[in-house]
Structures are given as C-alpha cells and as structure tokens.
Image: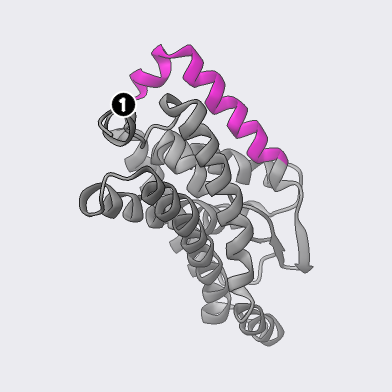
Amino acid sequence: MTISELILPTWILLACAAVSLSVLGLSVVHHSWQVLLSDRALQHRWLAASVAVVLMWQLRAQSVDWLSLHLMLTALLTLIFKAPLALMTNLIANLSLVLLGKVGWPLLGVNVLVNGVIPMMITVSIWRIVDRYLPDNLFVLIFVCGFFGAALAALGAGGAGLGLVMLAAGDPEAVYLAREYALFLPLLMPPEAFITGMLLSILMVYHPHWVATFDSHRYIDTK
C-alpha cells in the first residue's frame, strides 16, 4: 500500500520521516555489513531480489488518486535477508516510485514506515516468538512465519497507512474513503501470505542456506 498524494499534514510527514530515518539508521549501524561485502553470491541474490521488488511495485492497483495497492514482499525479504537488507530494498523500491514521478518526495518517509518498518517489525516479532517458544518443526516455521506472519504484516501495513489518513488527513472525502477501505483490509492478506509462504517453502527445501533466518541443522539435520 502506497500513499501517492499529499493529503497528510506536514507534522505527520515529518514524524514519519523521523521514525523511518531512525530505524534505517539503527539498522545500518548495527548490521554486520562485512558479511555482505565478503559474500559475492549474497550480493547477487540481494541485488536480484531488489530489482524484482522494484519491478513488482510497478504493478499497482490505483484504487483512488491518493492510494495504490501492491504486493510489499517486506516479510519475505526480512525472513530471507534479515531486517537491515530488507529495509534497504524497501527504501530502493520507494525511491524508484519517487524518481518515476508516481509518488512525491515528501511522502517517502511515510511510505517507508508503512511498507517497510511496520511489516518488518511484525515479521521479526513473529519470527522471534517461533524461534524461542514453538517446536523445532519445519512446517510450523513455514506456516507461522511465512503464511501467517506475512498476512499479519500486510494487515499491519494497511492498517497503519489508512490509520494515518483517518487520523490526520484534512480532506473529509479521503477520511471517508479510508474508513471504507479499512473494511477490505483482510483482502490484502491472502496474496501476500500465499506469495511469501510459497517462495519461502521453495527456498527452504532447495536452497535453505539462502534464508538467513533459517537454521537447517536445527530444523532438518537433527530430525
């Protein structure tokens, strides 16, 4: 979900930009970039995934002038590459929309927060719960993190985007439409869950070492 037009007040834009910048800054500072720099194969996979996401984001459903719907894939990227690289890809995808003139620069922070930070945090939280408290079962991991986690991340992102509009938009018509679209938020969950769960399942079976959050020794070798 991307907010395409300036219907939010300046203070909301600044607040979202500050939160997005803070989270991105923390992820850059605390991530071990040496792993990426020293692994040529990982570089290729991440760059290929980033290009794929940028292209997928061009396939958007423009429901109203100020709102467009598309697959986020943030949950999938978070599970495969972990949060810092997932946020970098999300930033690149949002910048591509800005550079192509589909979204204004002032909305960059809002869209990074809605499409990147919030679904990433939801995905990481669910993964940590599975990692610490649930049985070491491959199907549990795929279902809870891949399908359920991605669905919940899509719901959280959609709720955050529409919530910002309902909270602060100055256009009464936009607020009304946001309330109406909030009723259809569950429809965003199945496609995101299916794509994420399917691709995650394939990678865990054929290329488990590509999934940074997956421990093949724990979930496969010890069974």
The answer to which image quadrant residue 176 occupies is: bottom right
Horizontal relation, residue 155 to residue 125: left or right:
right
Per the image, the residue denoted by label 1 is: 32
Question: How far across and how far down the image is residue 202, in percent?
Answer: 54, 36
Quadrant assignment for the C terminus: top left
Horizontal relation, residue 63 to residue 151: left or right:
right
Q: Is residue 41 magenta?
A: yes
Question: How far across and how far down the image is residue 183, in percent?
Answer: 61, 81
For residue 17, say whether it is visible.
no
Q: Residues within 10 Å of mark 1 (few under 14, many from 20)?
A: few
Q: Nearer the viewer, residue 139 or 171?
A: 139
Question: How far across and how far down the image is residue 110, in percent?
Answer: 54, 59
Quadrant assignment for the N terminus: bottom right
Q: Nearer the viewer, residue 142 or 112?
A: 142
The kind of residue on which mark 1 rests is Ser
How many marks on residues? Answer: 1
What's the residue at 76%, 49% (across, down)? 59
Residue 109 against residue 161 in the figure, above or below: above
For residue 223, say whether it is visible.
yes
Q: Nearer the viewer, residue 210 or 220?
A: 220
What's the residue at 37%, 41% (across, down)? 25
What's the residue at 63%, 51% (across, down)? 105
> Which range is magenta?
32-55
Q: Main secondary structure of the magenta part?
A: helix
Q: Is residue 69 magenta?
A: no
Horizontal relation, residue 107 to residue 58: left or right:
left
What's the residue at 56%, 72% (across, down)? 9
Most extreme residue toward the left, as rendered?
Answer: 132
Is disc 1 placed on a helix, strand or loop? loop
Question: How far across and how far down the image is residue 169, in percent?
Answer: 60, 78
Most extreme residue toward the front, as rendered?
Answer: 223
